[in-house]
Structure formats: structure tokens, C-alpha cells
Amino acid sequence: MYTFKVDLNCDLGESFGAYTLSNDEAILDFVNSANIACGFHAGDPAVMRKTVKLALEKNVAIGAHPGLPDLVGFGRREIAITPSEAFDITVYQVGALSAFVKAAGGTLHHVKPHGALYNMAAVNEKLAEAIAEAVYKVIPEAILYGLAGSALIKAGEKLGIGTANEVFADRTYQPNGTLTPRSQPNALIADHTQALNQVLRMVKEGKVKTQQGQDISIKADTVCIHGDGPHALSFAQQIQEVLQKESIMIQAAAR
């Protein structure tokens, strides 16, 4: 009998041209949801098509992963965009990925902003509202993935679209529930045991220990595994095994 359930998602389709990132095909065996790059921060049309095909073959829920127009910085550098620009780039990228999904005979399941766009929308209400509105107007049945308890989740709830509170296995948290910026020390958790224990606490107890050592409440609907990490595949396998051992149901987020 399952007492808890959670979705495992991974950022994929981030290869570009002659450059290959991560082992997408193998990782898809251990996740329920794939967030596929849409060409702005990573990915290209051919990679989008191929990754969509792989996800459908492995029965993995497909999401659009729109980011800032910053290939050089992998979408992880903040750019001062307006809410109108956030709306436009989200519509553009979600539309592109959803077209590939439709062409392959599938259905777009969710939308999850990437990198700096994701973090900006977590705290900036106007950007969050613009992104949520873009999802609502393009694919209202899609689920909006956002940082747990963030402005993006609240914007989606306000519009009445499905939302999934996302937590991170390999990132540390600040007292306000935001992620420690990658530019700061100890932003990433390299130790797999520590990361796994953090996931279990977030899912089973609804708690996470901040970088400063205090516990804060957190809701875990979906757990992110970064596909571009050096040990992404082995960690994906480990986290799936641990969750199953703890009798935690693993399934794609639902409305």
C-alpha cells in the first residue's frame, strides 16, 4: 500500500548541433516526466523531435522546457526581460515543442521553465503571471511545474490551471524556500546519500533543511533530476530504487 506518491522529472533534449549532453535514452528508463529544451537555452529542432520520440516510446510524460534566449550561458544567466517578453518567449517555445509532440502523435503534459527564467518567475509575480498566462492560452490542460510554494505556482493556481510543486534532489535551499544560487558556495549537493535523504524527507515529512540549518515546510509533487550532471544516470537509478523501497508511488503529476 502506498502512503506517498511523487513524480520524477528530468531536464532532457539539451544537446545542440554537434554537441551532445547527457544520455537521454537511458535516463528515460528511470523518470516519469521529461522536460524537453525548446531551442532557446539548449536543444534544436532535430534534438526536439528525437527526444519527443524517445519519450513517447518509453511512455514518459512530455513537457516543454522554455528558457531565456541564452545558448552561451545555458539559460542560467539572468536577463532583464519584461512580463510581455516572458509571455512571448514562453508562447514561442511551448508552441514549438507542442508541435513536435502533436506530429509524433502525443500530447503535451506539462510546462516547466528553465534555469534563470524559472528562478526569476519563482519570486517575480509579474513574470510568473505572464508565464502562467502563456501556458493557459496555448495549452490550458497542461500542468505548470514550478518551484514549490513559489510565485509561479500561485500564478498557475490563480488562473485555474494544473500545477505541480517541484523540489530538487541536488540543490540546497534558503530560508524563504528559494534555491541557493549556483554562484554561491554549497549550492549543489554532490553526495548522493545526502541528496537521497533530502528527497525522502521532502516527500514523506514535507520538510527540508536549509543551507543555514533550519527546517522549513515544503510540498513535493515532483522531484527534479538534472540530466546534465556527470552522474545523472546512476543517480536517477538510485533515486528510483530508494523511492520504491520506501513504498512511495512514482507516477507522473496529475491535475
Image (spheres, rainbow, N blue to C red):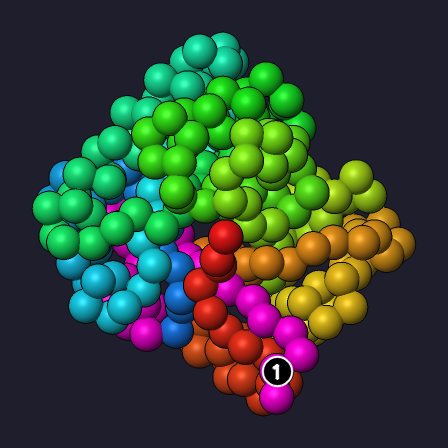
Examine the rendering and report whether any part of residue 71 can be seen. no
Name the residue rendered at 28%, 37% in the picture. 38
Q: Quadrant of residue 44?
A: top left
Would you name the residue on which mark 1 appears?
2
Name the residue rendered at 25%, 31% in the picture. 95
Residue 138: x %, y % from top left: 33, 29
80 over 231 or under it: above or below:
above
Residue bounds of the magenta highlight:
1-29
Tell me the kind of residue under disc 1.
Tyr
Q: Give yes or no for residue 20 being in the magenta stretch.
A: yes
Q: Camera-side residue: 229 or 105? A: 105
Residue 112: x %, y % from top left: 44, 42
Name the residue rendered at 64%, 58% in the picture. 220
- Where, quadrant-wise, is the N terminus in this rendering? bottom right
Name the residue rendered at 31%, 34% in the picture. 94
- Please state if 145 lies on the left or on the right of 195 as rendered: left
Examine the rendering and report whether any part of residue 89 can be seen. yes
- Please state if 48 lies on the left or on the right of 125 as rendered: left
Q: Using a 10 Å C-alpha cutoff, classify the residue at mark 1 as few (fewer than 14 neighbours), some (14 to 19) or many (20 or more).
A: few
Q: Quadrant of residue 195?
A: bottom right
5 over 64 or under it: above or below:
below
Residue 5: x %, y % from top left: 59, 71
Q: Give yes or no for residue 42 being in the magenta stretch.
A: no
Mark 1 lies on a secondary structure that is loop
Residue 142: x %, y % from top left: 40, 43
